[in-house]
Image (tube, rainbow, N blue to C red):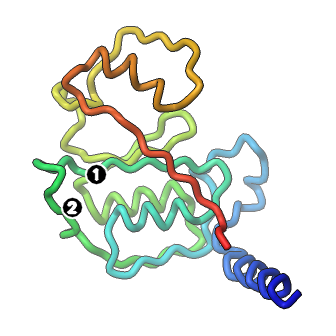
Amino acid sequence: METTIGLLGLLLLLSAESYGQATQARYDNTLSTSALDYKVARFNLTDSTLIGGSSKLSLEGIAGLHLGFEEIPREELSDPRDHSVRFSLSLENTTVRDIVGTLCQFDNRYTWSTDGPSINVYPREIIGDPSYFLNREVEQINFTDIHDPDQAFTPLARQFPNGHIGYVQIRMGLFI
């Protein structure tokens, strides 16, 4: 019984802590509103990086927010990530669009765009580079009987045998 009360108390505390952190403006209260127009009550970073800011934004719990981040390519996978651009910022009552734009202004090596419901943050240096793997065009690809996401990459890998193709699926949940 004490464990149940403790868990309920923890859930209420977490709910109260996050209440109001990410809110949709009253006039944006329709399902057709893009996640870009959602208002975030407070968005603060201290000595952080663009990837840290993107991660924090993705944890705000904004309905419909799909945020992708592509790091600057490293020479070797074993090379350390570049964390040289660090910044602090404090934004209030700001849209997701403005937050993503501000993050990219603080680390101008990156830019962003949208693709359907997704916001993609990626390195400026790869724009228009046809040798960059993710810029390659696929004329046609057919999928049949795909029951698992990793099976979708097999036809793509056949078209680009020298490419390194894979995916990572991350699920968030409460584990007690």
Q: Please name the residue shown 34% across and 58% down the image.
A: 104
User: Which residue in the rendered view is the most extreme toward the right?
Assistant: 1
- Residue 106: image x %, image y %? 30, 65
User: Which residue in the rendered view is the most extreme toward the bottom?
Assistant: 2
Q: 10 Å neighbourhood of mark 1: few (<14), some, or many (≥20)? A: few
Give the number of the disc on residue 71: 1
Q: 10 Å neighbourhood of mark 2: few (<14), some, or many (≥20)? A: few
Q: Please name the residue shown 16% across and 55% down the image.
A: 78
* 149 vs 58: above or below: above
Decide if residue 96 is on the left or right side of residue 53. Answer: right
- Residue 131: image x %, image y %? 16, 27
Which amino acid, by three-letter code, is at mark 2? Arg
* 14 vs 117: above or below: below
Q: Which residue is mark 2?
A: 81
Distance CA(mark 1)–CA(mark 2): 8 Å
Say which quarter of the image contains residue 160: top left
- Residue 18: image x %, image y %? 67, 76
Dot 2 falls on a residue whose secondary structure is loop
* 79 vs 152: above or below: below
Which amino acid, by three-letter code, is at mark 1? Glu
Decide if residue 17 is on the left or right side of residue 89. Answer: right
Which sits earlier in the primary sequence, circle 1 or circle 2?
A: 1
* 174 vs 130: above or below: below
